[in-house]
Amino acid sequence: MSATPLLVGVDCGTTTIKAIAFTPNGRVVAAAGVPTPTQYPRPGWAYYAPDELWSCTVDALRQLTAALDDPARIAGIAVASIGETGVPLDRSGRPLAEAIAWFDNRTEAQARRLNATIGGARFFAATGLPVIPIFSLCKMLWLQEE
């Protein structure tokens, strides 16, 4: 009889980067987690260094696979990332800036400007999202301007 395949979920969360191995029917086989390295350079600002996020993700996966009897049973991996957090990349896939955390408020001026120029109701009708500092477009504008 062949060994049951495993599915791995990786959750790059605000506080912890978690890796969990499940059987196809949902039974947890092993789990590991590493604290998410968040930087707070000034009040209202928070970011993640992309290389640190990657290193912590690799650490969590190494811990997980070390806890498995046979890591070769892993048949698939799904990854969920920190919501409203992105990393601009160059053409080679290297990070151009830090990953601005979803709860970082440095983009308040960009959110105010979008509300004033486009209008909150019109923006919501087009995107389904309110114009608030955590919105990715505000972060992209901040990166472009700063």
Image (cartoon, rainbow, N blue to C red):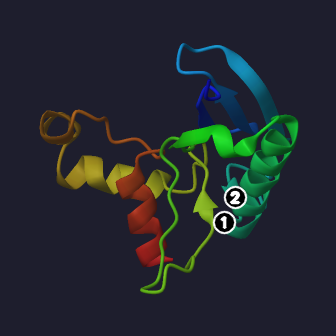
Image quarter in which the N terminus is found: top right
Q: Nearer the viewer, residue 30 or 86?
A: 30
Q: Which quarter of the figure has residue 74?
A: top right
Q: Residue at x 13, y 34 (%)?
A: 125
Nearest the viewer among 119 and 143 is 143
Q: Is residue 122 visible?
A: yes
Residue at x 53%, y 21% (from the top left corner): 24
Mark 2, Cα crowd under 10 Å, few <14 / some 14-19 / many 20+, is many
Q: Residue at x 52, y 65 (%)?
A: 87
Rendered location of residue 143, percent (x, y): 48, 71
Please say if 25 is above or below 104: above
| In the rendered image, the vertical position of residue 139 relative to residue 96, given as above or below | above
Relative height, residue 36 to residue 8 (above, below): below
Q: Position of residue 54 (x, y in %)?
A: 70, 61
Q: Position of residue 113 (x, y in %)?
A: 32, 56
Residue under numbered circle 2: 48
- Categorize mark 1 by other alpha carbons within 10 Å: few (<14), some (14-19), many (20+): many
Q: Which residue is mark 1?
A: 50
Residue 42 coordinates in the image, percent (x, y): 77, 58
Q: Is residue 84 left or right of residue 129?
A: right
Between 136 and 131, the one lying in front of the other is 136
* Labelled pair 2, 1 in contact (Cβ < 8 Å): yes
Relative side of 67 to 124, left or right: right
Q: CA distance from mark 2 to mark 1?
A: 6 Å
Q: Dot 1: what SS?
A: helix
Residue type, mark 1 in image: Pro
